[in-house]
Structure formats: C-alpha cells, structure tokens
Amino acid sequence: MTPAPAPAASNARQWVIVFAILLSIVTYIDRVCISAAEQNMRKDLGLDKEAMGYVFSAFALSYALFEIPSGWMGDSMGPRKVLTRIVLWWSFFTAATAWAWNFVSLWLIRFAFGMGEAGCFPNLTKAFTTWLPARERVRAQGITWMSARWGGAFTQPLVGLILAYLDWRTAFMIFGGLGVVWAFFFYRWFRDDPKTHPSVNEGERQVLADVEPPSGHGNVPWAKFLASAPVWLLWLQYFCVSWGWYFYITWLPTYLKENRGMDLKRSAILAGLPLFFGGIGCLFAGILIPKVAQMIGSEQKARRIVSVIGCFFAGALLILSTNLQDPTWALIAISFASFSNDLQMPASWGACMSIGGKYAGTLSGSMNMMGNLAGAVAPVAIPKILKWTNNDWSMTFYVSAFMYAIAVLVWLVLDTSKSIDQQSD
C-alpha cells in the first residue's frame, strides 16, 4: 500500500524571519538614536567632539568584546534564552541613557548597552541555521539587514521630530520600551528546535530535515578557527567595511551640519538616507546572490562577485562625494556608497553559516566582533583626523575608501566553500 504523501509544509519558519525583522528594527533604532541627538546631548552634558567620540566608541567596544561570548552562548544554550535576556538587558540601558549626568556616566551606560546588543545578530544567525534550509538563508539575511538599516534610517527623522517637542532624555526612554514588547512575544512563540514547535507540521519537518541540529555545541574548535585562512580573511574584510559604515551612525549628522551647512532638523532627516539605501542594498544582494549562484553554478563565486563590486563602489563613491559642491548630490553619492557597502552584508553573514556550520553563532559573533572593533576605533579617530587636518572632512572619507580597497582584495581570495569541519587541520 502506497504511504500517504506528507501534507504541505506549514511554513511556520517564516515567523522566525518576521521576529528577526522586528528585532533588527528595534536594534538599530536603539543604537542610532544617539547620533541624531548627539548635538543636543553634547550641549546638555558639556561635552566636546572628542568626548562624544569616546561615547560612540564605548558602544562599539563592548559590542565587539561581547560578540564571541554571546555567539557561544547561542550555540551552547540556544537563541531563545539568550535573545530574550539580552534584549531585555539592552532595552534597560537604552532607557538608562536618559539618566546620564556627565561623560563618565554616559560612557558606562553606552558600554553596558553595547554588551547586550552584541548578541543580537549572531543569535539570529544561529536561529536561521536551525529553522531555515540552506537555500533560504541568504534571502533571510538580506531581509534582516535591510530591516536593520531601515530601522536606523527612519530613526534619524523620528528623533528629529521627537526633539522638536520633547527632550532627548524622553526620546531614549520611549525607545527603551520597544525591546521589552518584542522579548515577551518572542519567548512565548520561539523554540530552539523547530521540530518540537506546535505550529510545525510533518510537511515542514521534512523541509527542515537537513538543517543544523539545535543541540548545544559548547566545545568550539578555537584552534581550527585561528588556523583557518578563510576565517581570518572573513574577519579582515568585515573590519574594513565596518570602518566606513560606522560613520553613518555616528558623525554623519554633524558632518552635514558643519561641512554642508544643514540645520539640525534637516540634517537629522537627511542623515537617514544612507541607511535607507543600505537597506535596499541588503535586500538586493539577498535576492541577487542566489540568482548569480544559479547562473554560474557556485554560491562562493556569487558572493565574491557581488562583494567585490560592492566594496569597490563604496570607496569610489565616497571619494566622488568629496568633489561634489552641491550638498544634495554629495549626499546622494554617500547614500549610494552605503548601498554598495551593504551588498556584501548577506554574503558575509551567509559565509558565516557556510564556514561555521554548527558553530555559526560563534563564528558570526567573532566576525561581528572584528567589525565592531573598527566601530570602536573609527568614531574616536574621526575627531582626531579633523583636528590634525584643520577640520578637513574629506580626509575621513579617503581613509574609509582605503579600507574598502583592502576589502576588495580580501574578497578576491576569500574561500567560503568549506565548513570549518571540512578544512584541513
């Protein structure tokens, strides 16, 4: 007797992408709001640019330091517990930013805030490896990062609007409540093992037959990571692209005001454009890479082609913007540079899933750590570059373009085709 065919897949796994989208938006709202409020905060707290640069750096430093521990926790404990805890943690410190009274208190609060946010994307990546078949992961990463960028893009004008009616302290307390709502619903719905979820039927269990098992992997092969050339190259390219990208969420509104003559309200609105374009780049790459891979028969080559093109134009367009006198055209060039930057985002995070395998949470955490080390250095370096060059903002763009050139060279040789377990010792 022929067995009955399995029912159509229930597609409950799509809700994991929905939760990832919403959390990505919350994440970037909470981290980007400080750049829009930066000038008001400096005035209220009596800080100069260099001091504010160190405040920006505090977030990126702790974000970098806690990437690997957070990714490891997701691999060993599962993303359900880890994501719920860290979202509640960083939401508290988002609100606590409103209570800062001087440089030291603000630095410590933003450092603690970064500790929590560090675990977001490594644990979302871990969730994707257990809930999504391989063919759906790059698209999911593209949608997730698009949502993150757009969350940051709309934060700039949103904060500008709020600051027209309320003070910056109230704005931070409002944003702090968003993550609490997300954590409540996520913990109720999500399961580390999709096959035990009541909404997953037999048809979907068959779709998920080949995904990474959700069991803990506490014994991370650090020796293999450190001996792996692809891992080191993955880290290096992400450091380079993050250097340029951090400008968009830290000093861009100040640049638009001081170098391009825009007032606070207009600079807050327009400063969101690069992140908006970056979100389009993430989505575009998430769709494009699988299609290119299908055409040429290699996902690795598809990642390489899209990333090389993206990094090249990210640097070239920044240089172009310094030679454009019209502020609008300069901002358009910067926005397309951000679009180009984010073409490599789905490729980088997809590479973490391919190379990391069952250790994807840890590897993605280590890659994001390297990116945020750049984020810790760049916001501090920019005021120093301005001081050394008599406020020449174009020099900061040339430094970023140099970083993108290094990333191009890295992607030309980066091999993402083998998992860490398949690489020779």
Image: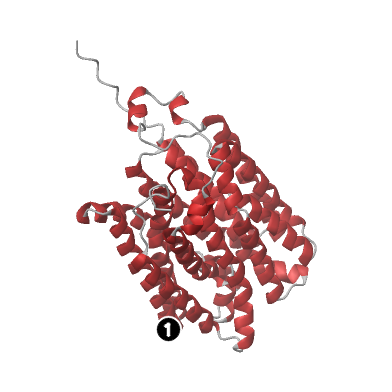
Compared with 99, 54 (above or below) is: below
Q: In which quarter of the image is residue 303?
A: bottom left
Q: Which residue is farthest top? A: 1
Question: In front here: 331 or 421?
Answer: 421
Residue 226: percent from left, percent from top:
51, 58
Residue 361: percent from left, percent from top:
51, 46
Question: In front here: 281 or 73?
Answer: 73
Compared with 89, 256 (above or below) is: below
Tag 1's secondary structure?
loop
Q: Which residue is painted at 60% across and 82% down in the image?
A: 385
Q: Which residue is painted at 48% across and 69% down in the image?
A: 240
Question: In front here: 295 or 172?
Answer: 295
Left or right, 166 with reference to 412:
right
Q: Which residue is farthest right? A: 101
Q: Which residue is painted at 54% across and 76% down in the image?
A: 256
Label 1 neighbourhood size at 10 Å, few (<14), some (14-19), many (20+)? few
For residue 362, say whether it is visible.
Answer: yes
Left or right, 249 with reference to 357:
right
- Which quadrant, please, contains the N terminus? top left
Q: Which residue is farthest front? A: 425
Q: Which residue is painted at 67% across and 63% down in the image?
A: 58
Question: In front here: 145 or 400?
Answer: 400
For residue 364, say whether it is visible.
Answer: no
Q: Which amino acid does label 1 sit on?
A: Leu
Residue 305: percent from left, percent from top:
30, 64
The residue pinned by badge 1 equals 324
Number of marks in picture: 1
Q: Which residue is farthest bottom? A: 390
Compared with 257, 8 (above or below) is: above
